[in-house]
Image: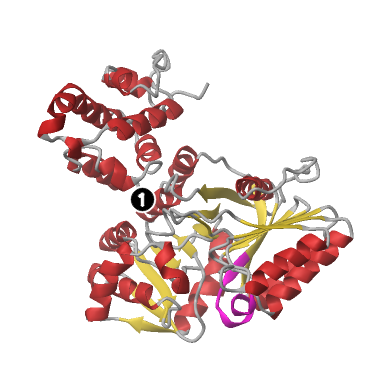
Amino acid sequence: MAAPVPGLPSRVPPPKVDTGDPRAIASLDEGQLAAATPEQRLAMLRTLIKWSHPSQNSQDNQDSYTSDQKNYEDAILNLLRSSPDAASFDRLYYNVDEDTLLNSVSWSGDITDLRKKFLAATTPGDWKGLDSYIDVVDGTTSSGRNHIEFLVDGAKVMPKAIAAIKGAKSSINVEVYQLEGDDVGWAFTKLLALKAKEGVQVRLVIDKYGSNMKNVQEVGKMLAYLNQNGGEAIPNKASLTGRRDHRKVMVIDGRTGFTGGMNVGRDYQYNWHDQQSLIEGPAVAKLQEAFLANWAAAGGKAPSSYAELFPPLSEPADGVPTRVMTHWGQKDRDLKAVFLRAFATAQRSIRIADPYLTDPDVVDTLCAAARRGVKVQIVMPKDNDIAIVQHAARGYYPKLLKAGVEIYEYRGRMAHEKVAVLDTYWSTFGSSNLDARSLWYNDELNVAATDPNLASYIEASLFDKDIENSDHITSYSPGIEDHAADIFHGLLTPETTQAGALK
């Protein structure tokens, strides 16, 4: 049984209630709702949302509405209000579809006000509090201390990755959003096939949509080649609802992991400005777990033995405290919750490198941080590969600049990193963009580390250098394209933007 909600007296037992029965849930009082376990609370909220339909309050449905609907709406609000802290509230709010939740009650302002109240109550500088918050909302735990080698660009990433693959003894598991059908993609595939012939278990899962398998036949040929040579290669099951596997993870022998923003192909290794990190330590087991979950979801064959995939892992003496955070597309928005809470926790500085920063809640939280004196710097590409997203992001420039946010546009190559450093202490990197679609539709994975030395290294090796090679935007007047993009970007689905998939 899960532990009681933090802050609740332990003498109050969880209610014995059918969490699938909306009427039974609606009959619970506030104390019983608060005493429910986190799992019960989330199950009850999902049930209430499913049965609550205020829009159906028509004359034909008047009897049904008056007998049940008000009780369901009251129960939703009471359940959310019974949350003793931000983590308990956000575990509910960010683990259901936001629009569906807000549309499940006649007056959604109460829910929105609760969300803002809990976020506003964040204590700047409370990094231990952030760790506890992450564990509750994301359902993760500390992965102890790990060796993290933060690598920028293909010239540094590829030698490390190739050496790790060549040295593999038992298993190579790779999960990537886009495998390009070019010379680099083929070289990578042939190296994996060579290791498979040597007896290493090789698994490769790619996103069918991200790799554009419908139009790029070479990608299918590469998967077939690996399968014919002893490996296992599959595309994920592309979702008609727009869910995508956007993660970039590689695990070697269960001991060495790589994750970041880099896909596999010539663009990503040579032409784009990107990042991938090498990790050794207990966090690698979390990367392995995340890979195997999506491998199974894509229809991959279960391993005959898990022992070699999860060898004992020790914490390096010089390691940094690490958490592996996951987000499952169209099931939760855990990473969005973490980003917002982290930005609200910053006391002195926030530095962000992200190519697709268009989420309005993220923008609002960054503005709030800048207004309370935090030095906020954002680095985005000057020439974004997705024009509509660039225009949508630029549409927020006046608001950000007015709040005191520093905006930089990186010149030259497409800047594709997804990295943030806060207070030269808390840092995160991974696959998640800061756009509304990435934070809801995609499966994402980010690593968070709390270490001033690592944070300083990331700032020096990435942010300081990038800002020197960027245009500093000090004023901006949105044009008609920016205004139009802000409207249409939010309406587009992944299916209607095949040529412009966020990578």
Q: Is residue 393 above or below residue 335?
A: below
Residue 395 image point, x, y percent: 27, 73
Residue 397 is at least partly visible in this image: no
Q: Is residue 210 magenta?
A: no
Residue 335 is at least partly visible in this image: yes
- Judge left or right: residue 150 versus residue 408: right
The amino acid type of the residue labelled 1 equals Pro
Which image quadrant for residue 51? Answer: top left
Range covered by the magenta-colored residues: 265-276
Q: Is residue 301 above or below residue 413?
A: above
- Category of crowding for the residue at label 1, using alpha-carbon neighbours closer than 10 angstroms: few (below 14), some (14–19), many (at least 20): some
**Residue drawn at (31%, 59%), measured in percent from left and top?**
369
In this view, the residue farthest toward the left is 59
Residue 150 image point, x, y percent: 62, 66
- Local secondary structure at mark 1: loop
* Display colour scheme: secondary structure
Q: Which residue is mark 1?
A: 124
